Amino acid sequence: MSIKPSHLRDLTNETLSIILPDMASEDATELLMLTSAQESHCGRYLKQEGSGGIALGLYQIEPATYRDLFDNYLRYNQALLYKLEEHFNVNERNFRINLQGNLPYQIVIARLQYRRFPEALPSCTCSASMAQYYKKYWNTTKGKATIAEALFNYDKYAK
């Protein structure tokens, strides 16, 4: 079981439009759809499976990645940090709950993680470009995912 793609797409659009309007676009939404399709099969897994996995939520964000986002990006982008604080009550005690169960929060955190990179988002009209961007910036060369697998899961779970 996973989240119906049209519902997740609508929630992603609405969340970004309200909280991060300057980062909302069809390209951003589809990149996040591809990411969630690959990482959690659009919500089927809210905790990483196997071998003591620690990644959480739709996008399987690891606590170290989450902390790095705050320590090395949001700390220097106070306007973005303020937007998070304005919409969400997040602290060290409840960040795991939010990363696992608060869908709008997960959407915002994932979008901010992609925002860290200077390369423009790929066009949503080219799935291959989105999968390459995902692999480069989200899964990285250290990750197990492949571009082909990301494309397959995007078609299977997000369309």
Image (cartoon, rainbow, N blue to C red):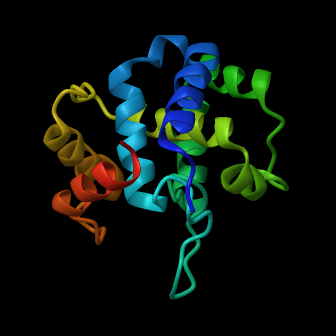
Q: In this view, does 73 lie to the left or right of 93?
A: left
Q: Is residue 115 left or right of residue 58?
A: left
Which quadrant of the figure contains the C terminus? top left
**Farthest residue toward the top?**
22
Q: Where is residue 118 in the image (x, y as percent from the top left)?
A: 28, 28
Q: Position of residue 67 (x, y in %)?
A: 60, 52
Q: In this view, does 110 lie to the left or right of 155?
A: right
Residue pictured at 75% horizontal, 52% vertical? 95
Above or below for 68 versus 51: above
Above or below for 145 versus 11: below
Above or below for 33 versus 27: below
Q: Where is residue 117 in the image (x, y as percent from the top left)?
A: 32, 34
Residue pictured at 61% horizontal, 24% vertical? 15
Which quadrant of the figure contains the N terminus? bottom right
Residue pictured at 18% horizontal, 57% vertical? 147
Q: In this view, does 154 lie to the left or right of 62?
A: left
- Where on the picture, by quarter, is residue 123? top left
Q: Nearer the viewer, residue 2 or 117?
A: 2
Q: Position of residue 21 (x, y in %)?
A: 53, 12
